[in-house]
Image (tube, grey):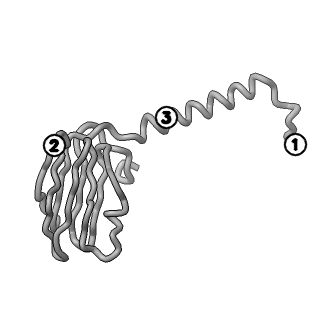
Amino acid sequence: MFSPRHIKPGDYFTLLLGALCTVWVSVALWSGGPADKALIRSGGKIFAEVPLSRDPQIEVPGPLGTSIVTIEKRKARISSDPSPRQYCVRQGWIQQAGEISVCLPNEVSVELTGGEKKYDSLNY
C-alpha cells in the first residue's frame, strides 16, 4: 500500500517538473499564432477578406437580415446579428489564427487566418 513516508524529496521534484512540463506543452501546442486577416462568409461563400490592421465595421447580409462584424485592435467579433439566441454575439472577441465565430441561423461566419492555426478537432 502507498504511504507518504515512501515519497522522498527527489520524488516531489520529479512530480513538480512533470507538472511544469505538462503546462508548458499544453500552452505551446494548443495556442494559435497571431492572426493577419478576417475571412467573412455569408451563405457559405466568401463575402470579404479584411486585414486586421484596419478597424472597420462591415455589414454582412444573411437570410434573416444584416449582421455587423466589428474589427478593432487586431481582434474581430460579430457585434450585431438578427438571430434569435445571439450566441455568436455573446461569444465576443476572437484574436488568434484559426478561431471562428459562426451565426448559423443567419449563415454568417468570421474566421481569423494567418500564422499558425490553433489546435482543433480536425487535427485530433
Name above or below for residue 85 compared with residue 12. Answer: below
Label 2 crowd bin: few (<14), some (14–19), many (20+), radius 10 Å: few
Going from N to C along the chain, the mark reached first, 1 or 2, is: 1
Q: Which residue is mark 2?
A: 54
Image quadrant containing the N terminus: top right
Q: CA distance from mark 3 to mark 1?
A: 32 Å
Of tags 3 and 1, the one toward the viewer is 3
Q: Amino acid at mark 2?
A: Arg
**What percent of the width, then of the height, locates residue 95?**
31, 45
Q: CA distance from mark 2 to mark 3?
A: 33 Å
Q: Which residue is mark 3?
A: 25
Label 1 crowd bin: few (<14), some (14–19), many (20+), radius 10 Å: few
Q: Residue 1, labelled with which disc?
A: 1
The residue at 32%/64% (across/down) is 88
Q: Is residue 32 left or right of residue 47?
A: right
Q: Amino acid at mark 3?
A: Val
**What percent of the width, then of the height, locates residue 14?**
68, 27
The residue at 15%/64% (across/down) is 42
Of tags 1 and 2, the one toward the viewer is 2
Q: Is residue 56 left or right of residue 93?
A: left
Q: Is residue 106 left or right of residue 17?
A: left
